Image: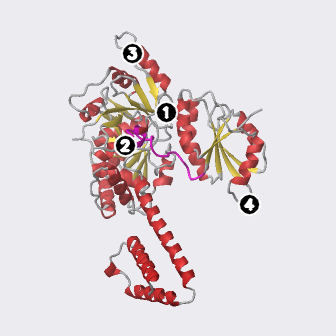
Amino acid sequence: MVAYHTHAYRNVLREVAKANAKPRSARNKDIALNFRAFFAESGRSGDAPTFQQDMQNVLTFMRSQREYKALLERYNPLIDLTGEERIEATARRVGLNMPKMPDFQDKYLLNFKSSLRRSSQVQRTMVTATATQVFACDSTSIAFSSEGDQVVINSPETLGALHTAASFLNDLHPVAFPTETVYGLGAVALNATAALKIFSTKGRPPDNPLIVHVSSRRMLQSLLPHNYKLSRSYELLIEHFWPGPLTLLFPCDHSLIPDIITAGQPTVAIRMPSHPVARALIAITDAPLAAPSANSSGKPSPTRAEHVLNDLNGKIPLILDGGPCEVGLESTVVDGLHEDGNIRILRPGGVTVEDITQVLVAGFSDAETPIPHILVHRRDYLDDALEQAPTTPGMKYRHYSPSVPVTLLRSTSDVPLGIEPLSPSAFLEDIKHVTPHSPDALRVGLLMPSDSILMKSLINDATIQWHEFPLGLVSEPAIIARRLFDGLLTLEREEVDLILVEEVSEEKEGLAIMNRVKKAAGNTRWITIS
């Protein structure tokens, strides 16, 4: 081969070698010989200049693909990997030590059957390794002692379901269960192997920490460093909002809590759920449970057992069905560990900023210590370092997004400079042209308050097939919060082409609602209502 062709040939071989995981000895030698002969023949042909240009294009393409794949591995290691490989790849990137996973599939059926045998109250049902069982639980049959350490369950069916779930958890398998906020995917928080299965089941990046759930103050104390004393603010918040949808950041005892729980941070997020099934499960398991929402990472959080089953069927052994969640949005996360004594709301949720403020103002009214300031992240202050290395879920990655495009409609907030708001009719004409849909009709889901003026303006267009999911009255943000995720998941199941969500006032529960909607929406439009 002439010098140029020899150079090009070697460059192509180098790119092939970099892209090929097999060693040279394991590659097909016949293909290599034919490729070399093809190169030599092309170099002697009369069309050599064209061939040279083609080879240059091939090299450029191969290099760009290799570099692109390297970037994906660096910044989005969720491509072309199994669940465990995906988690381990990201963990290596953020410097976490990961435990070696046991072979889940080989032991799954054996553990499932043995767990069923250990529970005399549960019907002995033969299942396959891919089956997910759903056991109903009666929340009204569960009661706790004043200290929360002892649980009494009057329903044999509920008791059996809880013992079966506890058996799975102690065997280091994840289980879905209801909380007052959303359904959680729980695993024993003190075992790194158990916690890792949460990440692999959800496809969750391991630099996204987990919240640890406890059933009593005694269990909380067992997790904290011996020299740590609760602040006055924390004592007040625990007294008023625990058990309930409030998560607090505490110093982490790394001798107890694995790095995978905290993403290597010096703090750990802990809360005590108020849902009787959740607290009873933690108490019966006799271990704190790490539990993010029981869904594939990035999707809307489930508020019903059927939401979990639709998403994770076959990926987990058991779902405890405790009915729809009362709050419907995740917990409020509070960081009160700073030296200034102020309370930082890292994630708004089931406990409102107004409620927290009221409790602290009343609790510090007779104290010499000044009342702490309440600071909401991204409203009252910014912390880029915290967003890159979050201490709590929901801060770094996009969340709450269904497979259907979501557009946030703003009709009451200030319009940014350079944005021209549209009338409802002009907006609808626009989405008809830009939204992919079937030839029959555009199917649009409406996720708006029941008394929305904007919704009444939109549905006058009869050329669109409307799917309405009323959220409740504008004056009742707690109801809207409860129905938000249910609405996103319901409209997704109805296979609409687009979901339109109307903004609400960012007061009380509205702050948490808009936090979720902004993350779910891929687009925001401003609408004028005459």
Q: Are marks 3 and 2 in contact (CB under 8 Å)?
A: no
- 51 or 312: nearer the eye? 51
Assess disc 2: are there few (<14), some (14-19) or many (≥20) residues with their C-alpha within 10 Å of its C-alpha. Answer: many
Q: Is residue 399 magenta?
A: yes
Q: Which residue is mark 2?
A: 210
Q: Residue at x 34, y 41 (%)?
A: 281
Q: Quadrant of the N terminus?
A: bottom left
Residue 180 horizontal side relative to residue 148, left or right: right
Q: Using a 10 Å C-alpha cutoff, classify the residue at mark 3 as few (fewer than 14 neighbours), some (14 to 19) or many (20 or more).
A: some
Q: Is-magenta flag for residue 242?
A: no
Label 4 residue SS: loop
Q: Position of residue 234 (x, y in %)?
A: 35, 24
> What's the amino acid at mark 3?
Gly
Coloring basis for residues? secondary structure
**Along the polypeptide, which appears first: circle 3 or circle 1?**
3
In front here: 100 or 240? 100
Q: What residue type is disc 2 on?
A: Leu
List the residue tagged with mark 3.
363
- The quadrant holding residue 500 is top right
Q: Secondary structure at mark 3?
A: helix
Along the horizontal axis of the image, is 528 left or right of 45? right
Q: In the rendered structure, find residue 518 and report the number of the disc placed on it.
A: none
Q: CA distance from mark 2 to mark 1?
A: 21 Å
Label 3 or label 1, whichever lies nearer to me, is 1
Vertical comparison of 368 with 148: above or below: above
Q: Amino acid at mark 1?
A: Arg
Question: Which mark is first along the chain, 1 or 2?
Answer: 2
Q: Which residue is mark 4?
A: 439
